[in-house]
């Protein structure tokens, strides 16, 4: 199993550009999450999904959108990138409610 | 005040020392997680516990639900243990709440 994969690893965006961060898991997990991690801060939840077709907002959803059309994929869309979205983004998944989360390697995004 | 507080924020130890990292939380929880973030950025789950104590190799995690407190212990620390250790709590539902992490450096 590849586990949780994220692409790209690094990206530099100009203000106002858009992009999609890809996340795929091959463990047939129902629960998937997007977090951002700012320097020296804890992980903040952006969006999450408890199954295909179901998504919900986390703590910091503004400026982002998600979709979950399949169990495997959970892309995160940034529209009109802003410098405040400069961060490291982690995708994670788990099989059930009270189970450990498996994290992807992260995407380092810089908006200038 | 954060719902999850970790102490210390930074910890430097000599190889071989016994290390304790603490986590206090202010909400009722169903489970607590300890995670390790490597210097390269990758995050792995170390423990999930809802009561008592768990041990894996040189790592031990304990939780006291009544006192809303958990500790992560590392015995016979080694430079390869240098990482950020993150406490996260599972109040209810599908979401975790994370502490800000403890940066551990173990010197040879």
Image (cartoon, rainbow, N blue to C red):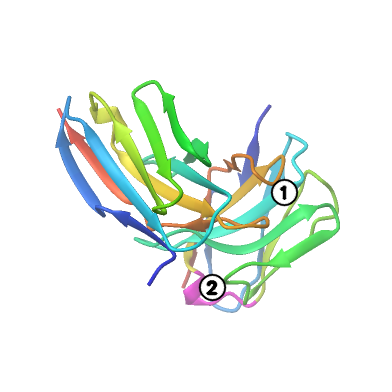
- Residue A94 at what x, y percent from top left? 67, 42
What SS does tag 2 mark? loop
Left or right: B87 as drawn, with respect to B106: right
Residue lying farthest top?
B57
Pick the quarter of the image with the N terminus of chain A. Answer: top right
Q: Which residue is mark 2?
A: A14
User: Mark 1 packing: few (<14 Cα in 10 Å), some, or many (20+)?
Assistant: many
Discs 1, 2 touching: Cβ within 8 Å: no
Residue at point 49% right, 62% down?
A: B27
Residue A47: mark: none
Q: Which residue is mark 1?
A: A31
- Residue B104 at what x, y percent from top left? 26, 42
Q: Nearer the viewer, residue B2 or A61?
A: B2
Q: Nearer the viewer, residue A88 or B78?
A: B78
Left or right: A7 as drawn, with respect to B47: right
Residue at point 65% right, 34% down?
A: A3
**Protein chain holding label 2:** A
User: Mark 2 packing: few (<14 Cα in 10 Å), some, or many (20+)?
Assistant: few
């Amino acid at each position: 199993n590849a586990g949780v994969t994220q692409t790209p690893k690094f990206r530099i965006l100009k203000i106002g550009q858009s992009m999609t961060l890809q996340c795929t898991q091959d463990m047939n997990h129902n629960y998937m999450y997007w977090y951002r991690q700012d320097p020296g801060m804890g992980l903040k939840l952006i969006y999450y999904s408890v199954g295909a077709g179901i998504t919900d907002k986390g703590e910091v959803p503004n400026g982002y959108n998600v979709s979950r059309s399949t169990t495997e994929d959970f892309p995160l869309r940034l529209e009109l990138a802003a410098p405040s979205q400069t961060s490291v983004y982690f995708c994670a998944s788990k099989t059930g409610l009270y189970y450990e989360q498996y994290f992807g390697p992260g995407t380092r995004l810089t908006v200038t | 005040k954060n719902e999850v507080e970790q102490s210390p924020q930074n910890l430097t130890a000599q190889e071989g020392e016994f290390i304790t990292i603490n986590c206090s939380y202010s909400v009722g929880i169903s489970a607590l997680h300890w995670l390790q973030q490597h210097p390269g950025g990758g995050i792995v789950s170390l423990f999930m516990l809802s009561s008592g104590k768990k041990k894996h190799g040189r790592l031990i995690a304990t939780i006291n639900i009544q006192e809303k407190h958990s500790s992560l212990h590392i015995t016979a620390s080694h430079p390869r243990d240098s990482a950020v250790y993150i406490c996260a709590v599972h109040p209810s539902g599908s979401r975790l709440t994370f502490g800000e992490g403890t940066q551990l450096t173990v010197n040879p």
